[in-house]
Image (tube, grey):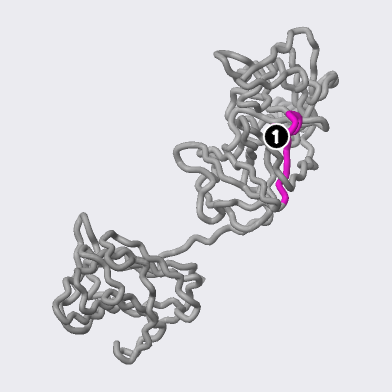
Amino acid sequence: MKKITILLIVIAAILTGCNLEPDVAPMPSFIGEANTTIAELLAMHEIGSEDSFDSIPVGSNIVICGYVTTSDEWGNNYKYINIQDETGAIQIKIDNKALYHKYQVGQRVYVKCDGLVLGDYRKLPQLGLWANGSMQAIPSFKTYLYLFPDGTPREDLKPIDMTTIPAANSIPSTMYNCLVRLVGATFVEGGTATFSEPGASTSHDIKMADGTTITLRTSNYATFASETLPVGTGEITGILTRYNNYVQLVISSLDDLVGFTTPVERQTIFSVNYANAFNEGWFQTGTGNAWQTMVNNNFSGFYVNPANGEDYYLISPAINLSNTTEPELSFTHRAPQGFHANTMMCFYTPDYTGDVNTTLWIPLPLSATDGTTTSVDELFALPEGAQTSNFRMMFHITNAPSAWYLSDIKITGLAQ
């Protein structure tokens, strides 16, 4: 018992003396100071008509310092960081795909440039290595020789405001790779295109208030690549770059966009199951040959072969548009022997009475011209008065000289 008591006392003393708080990683620090500004470094290399470089001799003791302005966390910046001081900025190529863990935005980084290469890719200044006729990334396992994070990241990085986009050759090299903010910017394809196509990086024009433009460049590997470009006018923060004579902007994430409106995707409110259309509310009335449906590998839709004295109406079921904004009716039609506007017509009504003859039908002017035989796509923005719970459309053929085919009938809109 005495031995057990002594053992417990020893264990208690050990535990009491232990610090159970988790270890905190030491703050990174660099012993030394910068002796060259980024602008002075950039002046050591003249950008040529082709990709070019200037070696920085070992022993030159060139040290620059800047704050990280890019992040590869969202996949749009690949194997590089940008650092910026009060005189300019430079892109540093590093062979690593997750640099944001070590080089966070706002992190101060010292760079020993001895042995590196100062060059350009399509006239964009870069710092790295040179091999096989082009700029190459610093191997990840060698970064400890050149890059030294220092202190904790700052949160007050201020971009340079831009309200106009000068020509590429009018922008000094110290301005490229800088963090900028486009003020009064509009996406030319806002609401209609995604940031990037699936197969390759994609360019989209941004228009400034004064009419000048800049290209937004987005990687297809960006996490937001499939998002739709926003609409309206706002501010865009990103890195100013160039590709030969094109001025470009690269953002890190969607958080870099402020003041825009996210487009609402249109929804299909009504479509047709042609295989069972006449059992799902479609009906017809009149004289002549009846409308029919066809569903095969080449065509799915309605068609009618007119007879002499043809006067047939094809009417849709009731469609509730009362909770839909900006409804649009679209369909495709074809008359193999030629379209005739006076014999092939489309109408709609916001309030069907139950009788074709007593209902107020509003005509929709078809864009096909008399005599055309090709398929024509029609699109109609339905007015506010059409947004009722008893909306119907009608196709009317009378004394027509040709068969008429209808397909892809649908109504889209923004559901409330």
Q: Is 255 left, or right, of 28 in this rendering?
A: left
- The spot of residue 30 in percent (x, y) is 81, 22
Q: Amino acid at mark 1?
A: Gln
Q: Which residue lies at the image location 70% right of the left edge and 42% below the top edge?
A: 165
Whether residue 20 is visible to the viewer of this picture, yes or no, is no
- The spot of residue 81 in percent (x, y) is 67, 30
Q: Is 284 left, or right, of 190 in this rendering?
A: left
Q: Which residue lies at the image location 52% right of the left edge and 40% below the top edge?
A: 202
Residue 123, compared with residue 335, is above or below; it is above
Task: Determine crowd level at label 1: few under 14, some 14-19, many 20+ residues with C-alpha closer than 10 A.
Answer: many
Q: Give the position of the N terminus as an image quadrant.
A: top right
Q: Which residues are magenta?
A: 169-183
- Considering every residue shown, the one lying at the far bottom of the view is 358
Q: Which residue is disc 1 drawn over?
A: 104
Is residue 305 covered in magenta? no
Residue 81, compared with residue 318, is above or below; it is above
Q: Is 40 left, or right, of 290 in this rendering?
A: right
Is residue 175 covered in magenta? yes
Whether residue 131 is visible to the viewer of this picture, yes or no, is yes
Q: Which residue lies at the image location 74% right of the left edge and 9% below the top edge?
A: 57
Q: Quadrant of residue 120?
A: top right
- The spot of residue 102 in percent (x, y) is 68, 29
Q: Which residue lies at the image location 25% right of the left edge and 80% below the top edge?
A: 313
- The spot of residue 250 in percent (x, y) is 63, 39
- Considering every residue shown, the one lying at the far front of the view is 371
